[in-house]
Image (cartoon, rainbow, N blue to C red):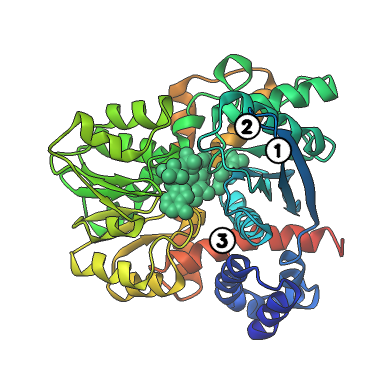
Amino acid sequence: MVKQIIDEVVKRNPGEVEFHQAVTEVVESVAPVLEKHPEYKQAKILERICEPERQLMFRVPWVDDSGKVQVNRGFRIEFNSAIGPYKGGLRFHPSVYLGIIKFLGFEQIFKNSLTTLPMGGGKGGADFDPKGKSDGEVMRFCQSFMSELFRHIGPDTDVPAGDIGVGGREIGFMYGMYKKLRNEFTGVLTGKGLDWGGSLVRTEATGYGLIYFLLEMLKDMGKDIKGSTVVSSGSGNVSIYAIQKCQELGAKVVACSDSNGYIYDKDGINLKTVKQLKEVERKRIKEYLKYHPKATYEEGCDNIWKVKCDIALPNATQNEIDKKSAEKLVENGVWAVAEGANMPSTPEAIKVFQKAKVGFGPAKAANAGGVATSGLEMSQNSQRLSWTFEETDKYLNRIMKAIYKQSKEAAIEYGQEGNLVVGANIAGFLKVARSMYAQGIV
Ligand code: NDP
Ligand code: 2IT
């Protein structure tokens, strides 16, 4: 049955390799659940979960600074609303196509379910490259994007947020356009500015949450983050705040990267410099060497996995750790990997880690702190209140602990103790399956 479902998804969605990859992992993981629950099989829960409820693709025309007309393609995949409004980020990156948005939307269903909050799964974005664009160009693009998206979303329908290439600046431009078109001030996007409905901790949430999850894993492994050496790929939102939390807890982070290459600083990365370069000046990571001449830079993004470390945090993008990189990490003595990015390890890489008994925190569980805090932003917007940093951070920590516990216990229940990949998939799936079953064939 597993093979049949996967074959059907591949046939119906040709060329969408990332989507096939994400579906294969989940379908294989949850097969034993269907054996225990023939009613889910009969109701075709899995087949229905693999088919998005709604797929939107639209033209995004805009005018660049030289007066030239540009045309991009926008997407929003409203994947599953069994447990709440569609929820998930928007990615602006030239590599974006339907297969990437569908894989991300599919992952989001199970991730959001794990958060304990009532959020369905969705994802969107565009094949727009914000790199090298002026603020004016980014604004015109965001406005054009929202001038179509606004009719499909709403605070109780579908609530987008950020992802690669979409941060506070882009959310601001999109929110402004939404508000103007709808004439309403509601929590339709998360990741908003703190002055206009945003939540404290949302900026830090994915990185902090990743480390809270890692700490739970390490507790069970009898290991300590303090004194460990860490490598964190990427130097965007997730990587920066994961590094910050690691440093706060006494770990030494020696390398981070961008899509051109990585920096290595044996005394530990100076995060202030990285923040200035990436969050303020939007420059390349290579420029770090100007301020820290003892650090080194190497071109090529997968080379970062050659750096010896105890803990590896893939925080950049999908499939950034392949089998060879995983083998290199294991050879160099890595003992824990926690995925901040979505699907950063290939299936072959995951096998390498599991075989070597490396503690492995899968993306859906480990990086769910971002969307969880988006859920908390939605709650605050509904209450028309804002919570303190401490309150929100404590809530995030509690959620990450709950995610770890659910994943660990589901793995044990299904006879795969220690396999958090299977555990997270099953725990995330069960809540959605129960809800879909209760709601009939819709
Ligand atoms: P940002 O845009 O802030 O940063 C992305 C970082 O990854 C940049 O350093 C970027 O380098 C690098 N990167 C992007 N694409 C590639 C690529 N193809 N190869 C190598 N490096 C690349 O995004 P985020 O930090 O928000 O997202 C990082 C990952 O975390 C993504 O997988 C995202 O889906 C996931 N995630 C994000 C959440 C969030 O709340 N933001 C929540 C959960 C998961 P460059 O600047 O050169 O492009
Ligand atoms: O992949 C993700 O979980 C995100 N990009 C965050 C989504 C959100 O709605 O906050």
Label 3: how many residues lie within 10 Å, few (<14), some (14-19) or many (20+)? many
* Residue plotted at (81% across, 38% down): 148
Task: Tell whether 261 sits left or right of 410.
Answer: left
Disc on res. 159: 1
User: Amino acid under label 1?
Assistant: Val
**Location of residue 434 by image quarter:** bottom right
- Total numbered badges shown on the rendered structure: 3
Closer to us: 279 or 23:
279
Instruction: Determine contact: label 3, label 1, CB under 8 Å.
Output: no
Disc on res. 236: none
Label 2: how many residues lie within 10 Å, few (<14), some (14-19) or many (20+)? many
Question: Mark 3 sits on what residue?
Answer: 427
* Residue plotted at (49% across, 19% down): 388
Task: Tell whether 322 sits left or right of 376.
Answer: left
Question: Mark 2 sits on what residue?
Answer: 190
Query: Ligand 2: does it lie within 8 Å of the C-beta at label 2?
Result: yes
Q: Relative to 108, is 32 above or below?
A: below
Instruction: Determine contact: label 3, label 2, CB under 8 Å.
Output: no
Q: Relative to 101, is 137 above or below?
A: above
Q: Which of marks 3 and 2 is in front?
A: 2
Confirm whether residue 402 shows in the render.
no
Task: Tell whether 84 sits left or right of 251.
Answer: right
The first of marks 3 and 1 along the sequence is 1
Closer to us: 126 or 226:
126
How far is the residue under mark 2 from the one under mark 1? 7 Å
User: Amino acid under label 3?
Assistant: Ala
Instruction: Determine contact: label 2, label 1, CB under 8 Å.
Output: yes
